[in-house]
Amino acid sequence: MIARQSNTTEKKGIHVLFSNFETKLIIFYTLFFLSTSNSSRHKQLTMHDINFNILKDRAMDVDPDIRFMALEDLRKFLQDESAASTRTTLNQSLENFFPILLNMLNDQNPDVQTQAIKSFEPMVKYLSNETFSKLVKKLFALVQQNSSSTGNVTGLKSFTVSVPNIALRSLFAQSNSRDKSEFVSDKLSNSNYRFDPHLARYIMDYLIPQIVGNPVTIDSIELLIDLVTEIGYVLTQDELLNLSLYLTKVALTETGLIGKKSMVALERVVALVRTEVVIDKLLAQINQSIEPTKLFVIFQLYSVCLKRGIKPNSIDTIYNTITSNLNIEAAEEEDDDDLDFDNLVKENSLKDEALTTLIDLVSQHFLPVESKNTVIALIKSYVNYNPLAQDEDFIDDEEDDITFRDDEQEDDAM
């Protein structure tokens, strides 16, 4: 009887032990599920429910660190794909934040200023066409204001890109040049934004006339490069011709960085040309501008047109202009004191550019067959050209004198 009672008590103890273990296990899994669920929910609420009123207060704080963190939180929020679900309300919230963000482009703290620039690109895909157009106009107004103030102070053209222009250009770094763009902060994102054709057309109609109709600046040329690269597909062939003629004029009249950048812009425009008519009209203006002082730029303009791969009607003019500047003249004996080395460098640079253009002409298979032998002979003359050949005898005599004197010194020593 006692043994049976003992066994019963032992079984009850084991049952209680397992019951407690199961209860604890259930509690553990319940708490684990709730904690992960709350964590996920907290993360979701954090990314979806950004408070723009608090964001505005932080963005206007006297502490630059707080202003910086406010913009960093905005950037992270916009880069999260789940934010797209709030697009309807987000568009209005972002538009209301424009005045503060535009003002921060002029922030005294360079880190805050840089962070403000980075804030524009991620918000593009959440803006309506109307809101985006408003932002473009506001930024471009700041660009023009900056150009006017800089010109009035110095009286000279600025060769640095303004902060508002960097922000404006970042709006267009979305599709065609996304992988190469210096503005896109999230290059791994798959949500590449492509502009609606109607919006692209509106932007071109608004910006291009103002760019072309005002004095050229580095800001306007840089902006034009990005516009043509990203949304240039909406331009007609006539518009491409007008832009090409404008950029050709800039390249021939401007020096330094603006002149070089105008050549880059022309390359982007010509790449969109599809008809021989446009190429011929462009080359007609280039040929009318031929002057001895402009030949270096003329050859570069020729190369841009030739690389497009559309054969023009003025091949003979291009060929004659190239070859007439590649003749090797017999070198006259001159003293080093009388030799103009600066002029010699310019002549060699011009010949180098002419040879580059000749390469472009040949590589596109535009070279007339009857000119083949002439080009081969020209190349051979450059390969065999040795401008210092006349001094070889003098150098040999000098070396012989040195050798003789060394031998004489050795004999004296012995």
Image (tube, helix red, strand yellow):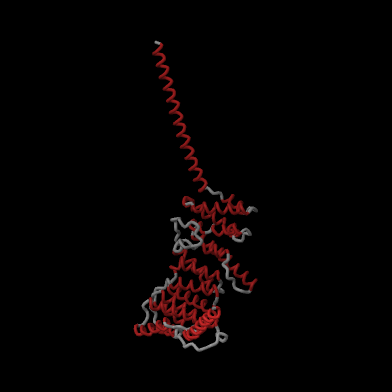
Q: Residue furthest top?
A: 1
Task: Give the residue drawn at x 44%, y 23%.
Answer: 16
Residue ID at (44%, 58%): 192
Quadrant where the image shows the N terminus: top left
Which quarter of the picture shows residue 22?
top left
Q: Is residue 363 above or below residue 68?
A: below
Residue 314 showing in the rendered view: no
Q: Position of residue 161 (x, y in %)?
A: 56, 67
Q: Is residue 325 above or below residue 138?
A: below
Whether residue 156 sits left or right of residue 245 in the image: it is right
Count of residue discs:
0
Q: Position of residue 180 (x, y in %)?
A: 47, 63
Return the x and y of residue 73 as percentages of the image width and height: 55, 51
Tell me, yes or no, if residue 332 can be seen here.
yes
Image coords of residue 371 (percent x, y): 37, 84
Q: Which of 397/218 is in front?
A: 397
Is the residue 53 above or below the residue 259 in the image?
above
